[in-house]
Each structure stands twice: as structure tokens, then as C-alpha cells.
Amino acid sequence: MPSRYWLNRVIAATAMMAGLLLAGCGSQPAPPPAGPPEVAFVTVQTERVVLTTELPGRTSAYLVAEIRPQVNGLIQSRLFREGAYVQEGELLYQIDPEPYQAAYDQAQAALGAAEAELAVAEANLPALRSRAERLQGLVAIHAVGQQEYDDASATLRQAEANLAARRAALEISRTAVESARINLAYTPIKAPISGRIGKSNVTVGAMVTAYQPVPLAVIQQLDPIYVDVTQASADLLRLRRNLEEGRLSNGVSRNKVKLILEDGATYAQEGTLQFRDVTVDPTTGSVTLRMVFPNPKQILLPGMFVRAVVEEGVSEQALCVTQQGITRDPKGKPVAWIVNAAGKVEQRALTLDRALGDKWLVAAGLAAGDRVIVEGLQKVRPGMAVKALPFGAPPAGPPGADANPPGAAPKQ
């Protein structure tokens, strides 16, 4: 019985405290209803954009000459400094010329003998021809025997054949002399082009052979210099289609090219697009573009990796949106959130062309005048009413906030 009494007292006290708490809560004013979320937007406007493509590639020498001997022999001397600039026609190596000089002298002597023998044969021929003609007339009147005429006629024919052989031998001797002269002229090895010469692969005293597979040295002309880059065939088709459809115009010189070096610096000299290959590489699906750049200070060396910036054309009505305003849907497709004329949010699927600095070039999905949300994207849903402010404007205060907070100077 006493325990029941105390239980009733506890229940009554609890009920009284709950009532006091409810009364206290009821005396507080209800919070004002929350307004639409604030978002910041940028207005899409058309602008003139020069479109460029950055293509990777490598440099290669304008001219390359691999120095190989054209005759066999012993290297007698080397007359250049490795890595130096050599002029066309400058002497590089000297092959021992003595064997070729001896062969040339011997050919000259053989030529002289052939000329002398030919002269003797030509001198004897008129007398033999005259005797054969005279005996032919005497045979007709039976003054001499037929055998004597036949012997004279055979001697004449033999002399004529000997003369033809001497003439042929003379031509062979002349050819031998010319061949020996050419071989002798090949013993000094000269530079076929002007340019920088690399290291020598042979030393003095080395035996070399004609047209050997390993060059003695390599000369490269580096000013100007080639830059070979590759472009995907799909990009080439897209560019051609855009030009045909009028999305791009040839308002720029598409033959002018800029170059970005391996360290990210821009090359000071501007190059020229020389040609675009007519064959697509089946393994990579790309075509090769060759450019020519002046290289007076020889900053560019063969084999360097570079990036060429090629001007494609001009888009007069390009739509560019800051990358901050472009998001991706669950499928990874680009979308933008738009504030429409009614102040509500719309989601637009976009087709992007490329990145231009901190902006995206939009190919489809937006129009000039659209308001793209760039801040507050986490608060919005399609169809939601929002309070839109231009990007960069100061945020508005909460509803009913005093424009002059306590302690602030009154507005004039």
C-alpha cells in the first residue's frame, strides 16, 4: 500500500513537469518557412573562337646523309672534328689512293697501246684494199690467177676485222681509264651536304669496304627542321565535316603552326604545315602531318618529343561554358543545370566538342541566353524553384533580415 502511494506521487509529478515543458515550448515563436535555395549562374553568350588542335610528334632532320665509302681501302686520315658543322664538298676522310693511282696509270698505258695499234691497222688497210681491187681487175682479163686474188681478198677481210677489234679494244681501254679515274676520285670522301656531323664510326688505319652497311659518319641538316605529328583520322573527318557544314570558317591561316617543347615552353619560331599524308596507318588509325620550322639556333634536335598547335579554323558563333557548370550523369554523359524563364531548374544533356582553357566548347544542348548554374548544384533538383543570382554577385540575406545590422552605419 505505501509503495502504491509513492508510485502515484511520481506519476503526478512527471505529468506536471511535462505540462510545464509543453507550455514553455508553446511560448517560442515558430521558425519562418525556408525560401527557395540560392544558386549562382552564368549566361551563355556566343563568341568568336579560333580553334586549334594540339598534336604530339617528333622532330627529324631536314636532310640526312650517311657517309659510306664507294671503294675498298685503308683510311689514311680523318679531316673533320666530330660534332662540327661541315660544308658541302668538304673533305672528311682520305682512303689510301696509291692502288687506284696505279690502276689508273696502267689503264692509261693500255689506252695508249690500243690507240697505237688502231693507228697501225688503219694505216695498213688502204694498201690492202687497193691491192685486192687491182687483182680483181686482172683476174677478169686472166692476167693473174684466181688464187692470188682470193689470197689478197682474204688478207683484206682479215685486216678489216683486225681494225674493228682494235676499235673495240680502244673503247674498252677508254672505259677502263674512266673507271680507274672514278675509283681514284672516290678515295677522298667529301661531304655531300652541309650540316652537323656526328661521331666517326672508324678511326685512321681502319679497312673499309665499298657500300658497307655501317656508315662512317652521319651528316644532318638541322636548319630548317621537320616536325612529324600524327592526327587521328576521325578528327580529320570531323574537321572536314565542320568546314563543309559551315560551323568553321577558314578565317585563319591553317598552314601556320606553333610548337610546344618538352619542358612546356613555347618555341619562338613559327612553322608551316607542309603536307598531310594521304594514307591512314591501319595499326593506329592516324595520318601523318609534316611541318617545317626554322631552327637558326639549333634548339630543336632530331628525335625530340614536341607538341604542335595547328590552327583548324574559326567558329564565329561558339558557345563556351565554364567547366564549373558542367557535371556528369550516372552514365558519365555531360549535363548542365539551367534556370529557365520561370525560375525553375532544368537539366540539359550536352554534346561537348573540346576544352578551351577553363571552358568547354559546347556543340549541342545549349543556346545563347541560357542561364547555367555554376554554384549551388548540390541543392537543386529538376523542376525546383530557385533564387538565381549572377555568378560573382553578393549573396542575398535571409528573408526579413535587417539591412542595417546593429552597430552598422545607417545607409545614406
Image: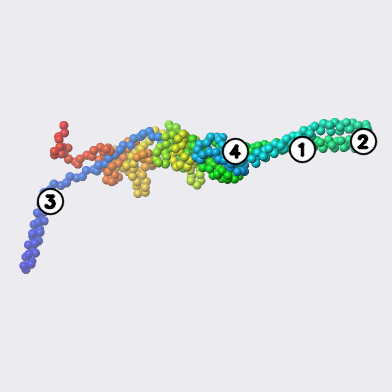
Mark 1 crowdedness (10 Å alpha carbons): few <14, some 14-19, many ≥20: some
Residue tagged 2 = 145
Q: Give the structural element (helix, strand or loop) at label 4.
A: strand
Residue with the mark numbered 1: 165
Question: Which structural element holds mark 3?
Answer: helix
Residue at 86% over, 36% down: 153
Work out how far the residue at label 2 is from the one at label 3, CA to CA, in angstroms: 167 Å
State the CA–CA distance, disc 3 to disc 4: 111 Å
Q: Check disc 1 and give the amino acid type.
A: Ala
Mark 4: few/some/many CA within 10 Å (<14, 14-19, 20+)? some
Name the N-terminal-most of marks 2 and 3.
3
Q: Is label 3 or label 4 in front? A: 4
Would residue 281 be visible to someone looking at this image? yes
Is 15 located above or below residue 166 in the figure?
A: below
CA separation in Å, label 1 and label 4: 36 Å
Pointer 3 residue: 25
Residue that label 4 marks: 188
In front: label 2 or label 3? 2
Tag 3 or tag 1, which sits nearer the N-term?
A: 3
Q: As rendered, which of 264 and 403 lies closer to the eye?
A: 264
Amino acid on which the number 2 mark rests in the picture: Gly
In whole angstroms, how far apart are the C-alphas of marks 2 and 1?
A: 31 Å
Lower position in the chain sequence, tag 2 or tag 1: 2
Instruction: Please say whether residue 212 is visible from this viewpoint.
Output: no
* Earlier residue among tags 3 and 4: 3
